[in-house]
Image (cartoon, coloured by chain):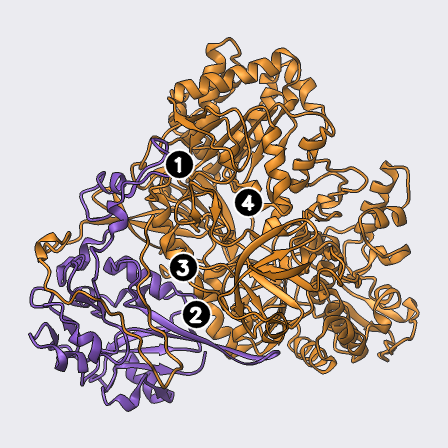
Chain colours: A orange, B purple
Amino acid sequence: MKLTRRSFIKAAGATGVIAVGATGSKPMLQALAESNGTEKAKSMQGEWRPTVCQGCTTWCAIQVYVVNGRAVKVRGNVNSKSNNADGKVCPRAHMSLQQVYDPDRIKTPMKRTNPKKGRNEDPKFVPITWDEAMNEIADRFLELRKNNEPHKFVLMRGRYTYLREILYGAFPDLIGSPNSISHSAICAEAEKFGSYFTEHNWDYRDYDLKNTRYVLLWGADPLASNRQVPQALKMWGEVMDNAKVAAVDPRLSATAAKADDWMPVIPGEDGALAVAMAHVILSEGLWYKPFVGDFVDGVNRFKQGATVDPETFSEKYTYGIVQWWNLELKNRTPEWAEERSGIPAEQIRKVARGFADAAPRAISWLAPGTAMQVRGGYAAMASHALNGLVGSTDNVGGAIRKSSIPTNGIPDLKPFMDDIAKVGNDHKKMDQRGYKEFPAMKKGKSGGGVVTNRLADGILQEDPYDVKMAIGYWNNLPFSCSGASRWEEALTKLPFFVHITTNPAEMTMFADIVLPAAQSVFERLGYIKSKAGTIAWLAMNQRVIDPVWDVRVDETEIPYMIAEKLAEKGFTNILDYFNSFKDPETGKNPANSWEFTEHVLKIMTQPVWDPAIKSNGDQFRGWQEFKKIGVWNSEPYKFRNKWDDFGTDSGKFEFYSESLKHALEKHAKKHNTDVDDIMETTKYTARGELAFVPHYEEAYRWGDESEYPYIFFEHRSRLNREARSANCEWYQEFKDVDPGDEKWGDVAKVNPVDAAKLGLKSGDNVRLTSPTGKIECTVKIWEGVRPGTIAKCYGQGHWAYGRVAANDFKKHMPRGGNNNELLPADYERLSGSTARHGGVTRIKVEKV
Amino acid sequence: MPNYAMVIDLHKCAGCGACAITCKNENNVPEGMYWSNYIHRTRGKFPNVRYEFVPTLCNHCEDAPCVKACPVGAMYKDENGLTLHNPDKCIGCKACVQADPYGVIYYNEEKPHNFWSDKEEAIEKGTSSGKEVKEKYDAPFPFYNPDRAKTYAGVRPKGIVEKCTLCDHRIKDGDVPYCVASCPSGARVFGDLDDPKSEINKLLNKYSYFKLGENFGTKPKVFYIREF
């Protein structure tokens, strides 16, 4: 594909503009007649229709302007009451127009005709009908069930709406497979670990930006990436007027660029900063006494190096402040942290004091950068625990939770589950969750959470057993998981793989059957739940235009169609179950896959649209009105309603985590060992009681410094629609809105000091090599990264997905290189998370 | 008559680029052209580094050199103080491009939006082509905005120039320019410079401001307040 790149304005500075004007070589008059669209338009005859943007995890309620059946523009839903109201939305949402009309979308079901799989194999896809596709898929399911091995089917879920309850929830259950494997652990489970084992909140926090006086960001870049980008964009001017902002980030991020303090931490050493700040807050008596309590006699005994008698301190809403001090904090001085983190002690002190002075209106904003590290579980706890020290948790101007969003579950499926399915469902899951080395303790339960990235190894090692069939939807695991080459091998090994996708993704290239998915903003049905600025909302994905191609809704229509085919062949349970979903208004059973989808949606969202049900938010006159408005808003969040009982084992905000102790001991017991052994197995250095408090752990890195001199770290793009937007021309044309990045490019950002050593200049092509992989990209010399570290944005490096995303789609040539081919597959094992951050690997750099 | 101008609050601006992207959307601007654009730079030495981002657009200068340079009157000042371009008069000589010190006028060297004429398919018969998608719709390209054609060529043809009109088609209907409407940070304010009560005058009275290329003698009407 030929894409021209006309020159664009490059100017040296704000007051001395040097124009490099666009010039052409043909100054001739051209016939106006060849133009399209020069006709004087009739007045615009369009309509704003509500739907949802899932370009990041903010999940904004938006509206699409539809003119003559075409989607023309996008804006925030004006009925939204959160801070992303006013019809405003971040740059991502607009790019969705180039996704739905992307010429590289899959337009028909396809079948592989080349049995050989691999990156360099042309799958030789040929179009087939939906009926042919369903026929083949149903036969495979029946074969598995006939052999009493339905558990050898794996459903791999990526992004989702809550209609996931059908394809990810009910469908595998009724087939007989426990293997519903979600993508959650490549997202941010380690972050939830931090707030769960301090205050029993396995969720992302909301932030009361309106009332805050200090924002301390831990690898968070709210002006650019999740989880509430439009609220941050809207509020940041006001935040900077009213509050101080400090950004802990190894890269000069979009938010760090506007912060009062940038703390370019050595990747993976975030925990040192967090415990040193806690040390300052305690030793200088700056903690928030109405929340934490005080020494009985009011005399501060938190003196450096001193062990404190717990009896001398009377805690209020917290638990274990003295134990935390004694076990971890007493010698964690800013000077000690400076050596590890690279951040001057004085800056640590200044930020800690500023943060505590703002108490309780001070936010410690935990994000994947600090949490999704091999030893990030405790860094997540430590940075979140700062909210406890300043009493900002669940408080005005602080880090808060969300109002409840009332929804219904789906009807009971047990009566439809046969014996083959019951036996199948009893097998272990393929992602090795709950193994000794993968505690994945979601909500404190060993094996309670997913270990997404381990599935590839499960498949390759046939541990716990071999997989014979898989369906993947709304995901692209060989692109989005670190150790990406393992996924290429695992997918090559799979005997039968179905990919439901909008685009020919990297994952699609390994599929036996490809099914075209309805695009999430414009063509599907679904609903999401989210929160920002004290408002929680439920919004619906709606079909706002006729689908561009013959697509189906992944989560509901496709399982329904498979169920129809299974019924035709004699296995009727699933279709019987699906057909039992009655329309809550008419009582009618569904007649087809679309009606089924509508019924699921109406059933699940009934508590918000049914006028007979009182909700804690907007009331509607009925389904039709809710559809038209498209979003339900909660009442504003009520602060401090968790203070009296956080739900932890102690009921308090835990600085000494009885909850974590309990969880670790249970996991150890399950494997007939002790917690120290679990710590060692999961790559943590803590022994004894240190495992139960937020503490410093030295960064874990792959690669020997002598062979791999540079610490590599990655970050997110403000234009990534979760790595699905690289095939949009606008993504490429505006890639330089990520500080340090280049249009149409994929750059490794190198400090000038290192560039000089390496003899590199901006624009040079380089190969980056880690102990597990290598990629090629371009160099950008930039002061926004620390000497000794190299930063690169995630999102480019597609060798498939489309002709814009890839440098040469047909030759599988990537545009730049995918970070995940460089990053080793490693984990924050206590949460099951993929450890993509914290400088998990060292690399070497060679000019090519 | 009003004298339209814009104030951009760099303190509120988050450098997200929504202005530049949505401008393309509103005005059907082809690939490689940036009616709404930005300048960014990184200054200083690690760790004392500053990143700056300045959104840019046509300054709708009171003394517009592009207007003076145009030999056929295609580039002109309208009664509302906007610098506009008449595609029917334009001969594509690019004198305006040469005269414009801000680099905001673009020349259509090729047929615009040729992405949508392309016949190549990534996967033969399995995926589509630009041409095939375009032909499903009665429009120059699928998300073409017909509103743009109310006052200007909906898509500007090969051989002539094009530029920001401050969304004169929206202003005419009482709306604000699309970059203002879609800025998620509320950093852009549009209004009448001759109306002392306008929001932009309030801001210009409250804050000190600068303009781009003030020494060019062009009297630009895009004002910047505060710091990024």
Which amino acid, mark 2? Gly
Which amino acid, mark 1? Ala
Residue A479 is tagged as 4
Nearer the camera: disc 4 or disc 3:
4
Q: Mark 2 points at which residue?
A: B15
Report how far apart the C-alphas of labels 2 and 1 lie in the structure: 32 Å
Q: In which quarter of the image is residue B34?
A: bottom left
Identity of the residue drawn at 42% across and 62% down:
A743
Nearer the camera: disc 4 or disc 2:
4
Residue A544: horizontal and vertical position, in percent?
Answer: 32, 42
The chain containing the residue under callout 1 comes to A
Identity of the residue drawn at 28% across and 43% down:
B130
User: Which badge, 1 or 3, comes first in the chain's sequence?
Assistant: 3
Report how far apart the C-alphas of labels 2 and 3 lie in the structure: 10 Å
Q: Quadrant of residue A127?
A: top left
The chain containing the residue under callout 2 comes to B
Residue A518 is tagged as 1
The chain containing the residue under callout 3 comes to A
Residue A91 is tagged as 3
Q: Are marks 4 and 3 on the same chain?
A: yes
Identity of the residue drawn at 51% across and 76% down:
A240
Q: How crowded is mark 4: few (under 14 residues within 10 Å), some or many (20 or more)?
A: many
Image check: A626 left or right of A112?
left
Residue A318 vertical placement versus A728 (above, below): below
- Secondary structure under tag 4 reads helix
The answer, for residue A639, to whether it is visible in the render is no
Report how far apart the C-alphas of labels 1 and 3 lie in the structure: 22 Å
The chain containing the residue under callout 4 comes to A
